[in-house]
Image (spheres, helix red, strand yellow):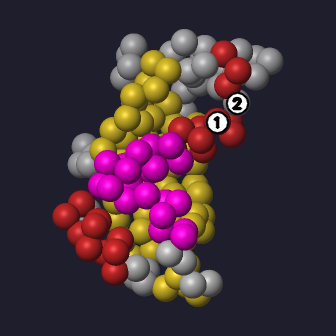
Amino acid sequence: MEKYIFELDFKVRDYECDLQGIVNNANYLHYFEHTRHEFLDNMNINVLELHNQGIDPVIARVNMALKTPLTSGDEFVSKLFLTKEGIKYTFHQDLFRKSDNRVVAKAKIEAVTIINGRLSRSELFDQAFAPYIKA
């Protein structure tokens, strides 16, 4: 079992579903992004404030697998843990439907930092994430 360091609860809204009555695939990326932003907010890291300082965490790659569809009204939990390789952080994010704890989606989302327009190592993130990094 992975060691999750953060989790966030969600409930599917009607407008997130497609004609088939299941969550449209693009919405999973929104769920993952919102979870990462809440994780950062929980650490008192504000992405807008960082941007205003010339520090931009950006997504470099997403690998997502959809396992079980969600439908309107489904409650689910988003969980994440982190690994680091060089200047790249990987957010390992999984969604679980609450009613049966089935895996809904799994993603590996790689993030890097652009500082003043250049790909760079971020001391801020290195320090903030150090206690949570899973090798």
For residue 128, what is the image quadrant? bottom left
- What secondary structure do most residues of the magenta stretch adopt? helix
Give, as a single range, the part of the protein colored magenta.
33-52
Q: Nearer the viewer, residue 50 or 101?
A: 50
In the image, 47 versus 59, the foreground residue is 47
Q: Is residue 73 visible?
A: yes
**Is residue 135 something one can see in this rendering?**
no
Instruction: Say above or below: 34 vs 91.
Output: above
Depth check, front residue: 119 or 49: 49
Quadrant containing the N terminus is top left
Residue drawn at (32%, 48%), measured in percent from left and top?
Answer: 42
Extreme right residue here?
19
Residue 113 percent coordinates (x, y): 50, 75
Packing grade of label 2 (10 A; few <14, some 14-19, many >=20) is some
- Magenta stretch: residue 64 in it? no
Q: Is residue 91 above or below residue 21?
A: below
Determine the secondary structure under disc 2: loop
Q: Quadrant of residue 65?
A: top right
The picture places residue 39, in percent across and down from the top left corner, at 37, 49
Residue at horizontal 59 percent and vertical 41 percent from the top: 30
Identified by mark 1, the residue type is Asn
The residue indicated by pointer 2 is 24
Amino acid marked by disc 2? Asn
Cβ–Cβ below 8 Å for labels 2 and 1?
yes
At x 26%, y 73%, the residue is: 127
**Residue where numbered disc 1 is placed:** 27
Left or right relative to 13: residue 21: right
